[in-house]
Amino acid sequence: MNQVVISGNLTNDCTVNWYSNNSKAILGFNIGWNHTKKDEFGNYQKVPNFFSVKHFPKNADLAQKLTKGSFVVLSGELRQENWTDKDGNRKSNVVILANEVYLPEKMKNTDNSSTQTTIDLSNQKQDEDVPF
């Protein structure tokens, strides 16, 4: 099983690349979050983590909402991409292929209390034959 669920903040604005005669979009963004670990002195330190994310939605409208600093929750799988750079060096990177992307939003009720709502984008399915 290859399944990952991550929440964090976008470290950049989402980019949109088109393939298949500009009919299908590849959304790309980076997500970052901190985890806490104890250092050699017993103090807790926040350690940043970053991952590249690719998402293949049915339409690219989602990209407008995926801006730097936005909080997202996503699920998908890990994939290792391999390539050779212009100098002939082999490179690799682990990316998250997001199947679902959620944008939690805080909203105010009429009585000024906060509630947590989620935009469900689960109908955004990933194509099986996506080029890398």
Image (tube, rainbow, N blue to C red):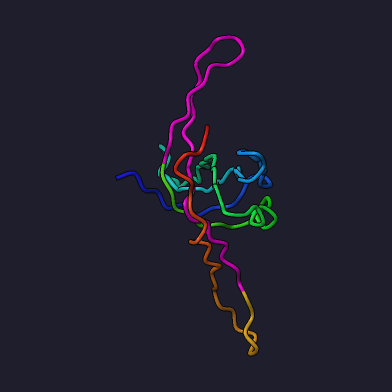
Range shown magenta:
78-106
Q: Nearer the viewer, residue 47 or 54?
A: 54
Residue 36 coordinates in the image, percent (x, y)? 45, 48
Residue 104 coordinates in the image, percent (x, y)? 56, 65
Taking the magenta stretch, the answer to whether it contains residue 63 is no
Residue farthest toward the front in the current orientation of the protein: 21
Residue farthest toward the top in the current orientation of the protein: 87
**In the drawing, does residue 64 fall left or right of residue 122?**
right
**In the drawing, does residue 75 fall left or right of residue 103?**
left
The prevailing secondary structure element of the residues shown in magenta is strand
Residue 20 coordinates in the image, percent (x, y)? 60, 39
Taking the magenta stretch, the answer to whether it contains residue 88 is yes
Residue shown at 44% from the left, 53% from the top: 75
Give residue 59's quadrant in the image.
bottom right
Residue shown at 60% from the left, 83% from the top: 113
Tell how many labels: 0
Residue farthest toward the left in the current orientation of the protein: 1
Q: Nearer the viewer, residue 126 or 22?
A: 22
Q: Nearer the viewer, residue 65 or 46?
A: 65
Give residue 103's quadrant in the image.
bottom right
Q: Where is the N terminus found, in terms of image quarters?
A: top left
Residue shown at 60% from the left, 9% from the top: 87
**In the drawing, does residue 47 fall left or right of residue 108?**
left
Q: Is residue 61 above or below residue 93?
A: below
Q: Is residue 125 above or below residue 89?
A: below
Residue shown at 53% from the left, 16% from the top: 84
